Image (spheres, helix red, strand yellow):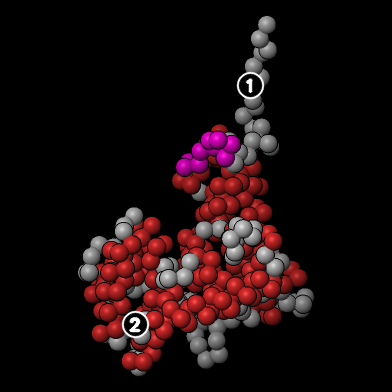
Amino acid sequence: MNSPKIKKSKNSYAQDEGSTRLAQAAADGDVPARKRVSEIAHPIISYQTNSFCKRFCKENHYYHQCTLFPDWGSSRADALFCEWGNASYTWMLDDLTKTSRLKTFKGTDGARLGGYLFHIANSLPFYERWKDWRFGRKIHVPTYIREMEHDAAKVFLALLGGENIPMIAQKLVRAEPEIEDLVNNIIISLTKRKRLHLLDPPQTVSLTNPAPGTSDSADNSGQLDVASRDQSAEDLENRRQLQLAWAELDAAEQFVLEAMLVEEQDAKDVLNALVRLDISLAEGVPATETNQQQLYYFRRKTLIKLEKLMGSQQ
């Protein structure tokens, strides 16, 4: 005699974090399902807010109480709460659990919703979206760039975001030689107009504490004009060589240099990120077994490689 089938309760989502059913129910507005999805996303968001907020906190934590990580904020009991912590948490929750995203999840082959959200939260597009929201970035793509061809503006923005040619080609589903030609044309066009500095990474500033002598009005809070000063021919050439050499580094090399030199992250934080993203620095050596000495050696070796690549561009 066959055992009777037990009908699962509509609200029994406690252990059902990997199924398509949970994601679809949450996307349809089911309250218990939405609550369960938020619970799954919570540790992911907590980790990323800790990483992102502290990376760009600047001097905020000296003057304000952190709403997410009390030990990080000001020790003064009467200090105002920082507005960015809870706002960042809310933005990430909305981005990760929005209806359109949940509807695309398919829990096939044992895929879990937590893994799906983790993958999105640790992607470069998610990081860039958060920075766009956090700093109110409004990037102008010059008309002469947009008129080159239909993907020129996308390539310009990708270069501004520090992406290399293989990454751009993969994103646009185009051949690398095509993207390389387009990148060269963009650089040549900007150089002729003495505007190569438009590819400099956007600056980041504290929005809670405007710099002395600047206005904190709503009209200019968080907005930075792109510098229009001309650069010397030598500076332009050095930047061109650096961009071409940087594009020849692999993903691990770019990640380590950007994390340690550009963002000035601590070696321990970089090692943790390597483990989290499963990035190996040496063949046969898993990320979990990489130590600080190996990390510093890898950084030094990559800098030497970058210098040689720049020399070959001369």
Please tell me whether mark 2 or mark 1 is closer to you in this view. Answer: 2
Asked if one can make out residue 34 in the rendered structure from this viewpoint, the answer is no
Q: Amino acid at mark 2?
A: Leu
The image quarter containing residue 263 is bottom right
In this picture, which residue range is highlighted in magenta?
103-111
Which of the pair 39/148 is nearer the observer? 148
State which quarter of the image contains the C terminus. bottom left
> Does 246 sit above or below residue 275?
below
Residue projecting furthest to the front: 284
The label on residue 7 is 1
Residue 101 percent location from the top left of the image = 48, 47
193 displayed left or right of 28: left
> Does 197 sit above or below residue 276?
below
State which quarter of the image contains the N terminus. top right
- Of the numbered discs 2 and 1, the one sitting upstream in the chain is 1
Which of the pair 244/49 is nearer the observer? 244
Q: Residues within 10 Å of mark 2 (few under 14, many from 20)?
A: many
104 displayed left or right of 31: left
Q: Which residue is mark 2?
A: 196
Q: Amino acid at mark 1?
A: Lys
Residue 184 percent location from the top left of the image = 29, 74
Asked if one can make out residue 244 in the rendered structure from this viewpoint, the answer is yes
Residue 190 percent location from the top left of the image = 29, 80
Residue projecting furthest to the top: 1
Which of the pair 155/140 is nearer the observer? 155
**Does dot 1 land on a helix, a strand or a loop?**
loop
Q: Residue at image x 63%, y 75%? A: 297
Label 2, label 1: how many angstroms apart (C-alpha)? 64 Å
Q: Residues within 10 Å of mark 1 (few under 14, many from 20)?
A: few
For residue 7: magenta? Answer: no
